[in-house]
Image (cartoon, rainbow, N blue to C red):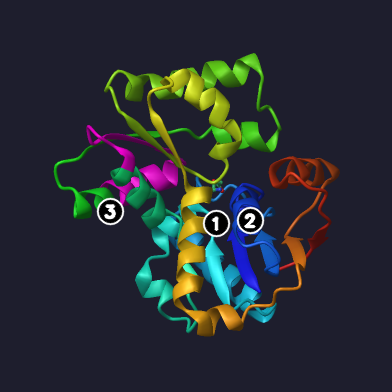
Amino acid sequence: MIGIFDSGTGGLTIARALADHLPGYDIVYFGDTARTPYGNRSPEAVIRYTLRNIHFLLDKGAKIIVMACNTASSFADEHITKRFDIPIFEVITPAVALSLNVSKTFRIGVIGTRATVNSGIYEKKIREINPDAKIYSAACPLLVPLVEECWTDKPETRMIVKKYLYPLKVRQIDTLILGCTHYPILKKIIQRKIGKRVNLIDSSLAVSETVKDFLEKHPEVDNSLGKEGKAEFFVSDVTEHLENTARIIFKRNIALRLIRI
Ligand code: DGL
């Protein structure tokens, strides 16, 4: 099983990309919908939820885990993930690597939740590789609720995206990291508002490539993963609306199972 978790439904963009890149691999997804959004919570709370989510996925038989949440990935660093004896992937490093590959001017924008942006994790990781890169970040706290509401093509959403992106646009970035797993759902609007010459870095693609590469290089891990095409989706709270959002993001009908953890 490949275990995947997020604070809610946004991580389904990563689950979708993983299912497309690794067809037939069994997946188990957990969305902590009772506690979403993580983006406005303290680092301590996010770390506590992250540890609990990892334990839940381990109990379900996960042999590798993808933290499909930038906020969790910002705080649950190696000190935390190394406590477990299975590979745990985060979403930030692959997006950083891809952004530095495609950027020509090294003027890079990052958008994410307030917690992710305040953590400074993208700046830190980009500067570790390219100390001269110019990084401009913007917290976009309204975008997650807009995606959760399925307001993906409303004039109001376009206006809010435009307002959030303006400070990055004037900095003439050539690459923009979508530092939240909900944002690929708004990719078209974001591209339109930031300009068609700006490369958008979608972490769902970057992460699924990283996992695929890893499994090719580690057949012992690959062999431990079930490949019967099973997919289970657990959430800590469920409503009809949530089921609809999950179906839109995962692009398939899925049954959400309620688990009280
Ligand atoms: N999907 C989460 C992320 O990538 C954002 C949602 C939240 O704030 O919980 O950061």
Q: Which mark is in front, 3 or 2?
A: 2
Q: Residues within 10 Å of mark 2 (few under 14, many from 20)?
A: many
Above or below 243: residue 168: above
Where disc 2 sits, the SS reads helix
The answer to whether marks 2 and 1 mark residues whose Cβ atoms lie closer than 8 Å is yes
* Image point (46%, 65%), residue name: 213
Q: Confirm whether residue 41 shows in the render.
A: no
Percent coordinates x, y for residue 256 in the rendering: 80, 57
Q: Which mark is residue 15?
A: 2
- What residue appears at the point 54 percent right and 46 percent down from the top-left corner? 181
Local SS, label 3? helix
Where residue 117 sits: x, y (%)?
37, 43
Residue labelled with disc 3: 125
Along the line of sight, the residue nearer the viewer: 208 or 40: 208
Q: Is mark 1 within 8 Å of ligand 1?
A: yes
Q: How far is disc 3 from disc 1 in space, using C-alphas?
A: 18 Å
Q: Which residue is mark 1?
A: 68
Q: Is residue 217 above or below residue 259?
A: below
Which badge, 3 or 2, comes first in the chain's sequence?
Answer: 2
Question: Which residue is pictured at 67% across the width and 80% down the height?
Answer: 61
Residue at the image point whose x is 51% and y is 49% from the top? 205
Q: Amino acid at mark 1?
A: Ala
Q: Residues within 10 Å of mark 1 (few under 14, many from 20)?
A: many
Find residue 40 and report its horizontal and vertical position in percent.
50, 45
Question: What stretch of residues is rendered in magenta?
Answer: 102-123
- 167 horizontally vs 153: left or right: left
Q: In 3D space, how far apart are the residues under numbered discs 2 and 1 (Cα atoms)?
A: 8 Å
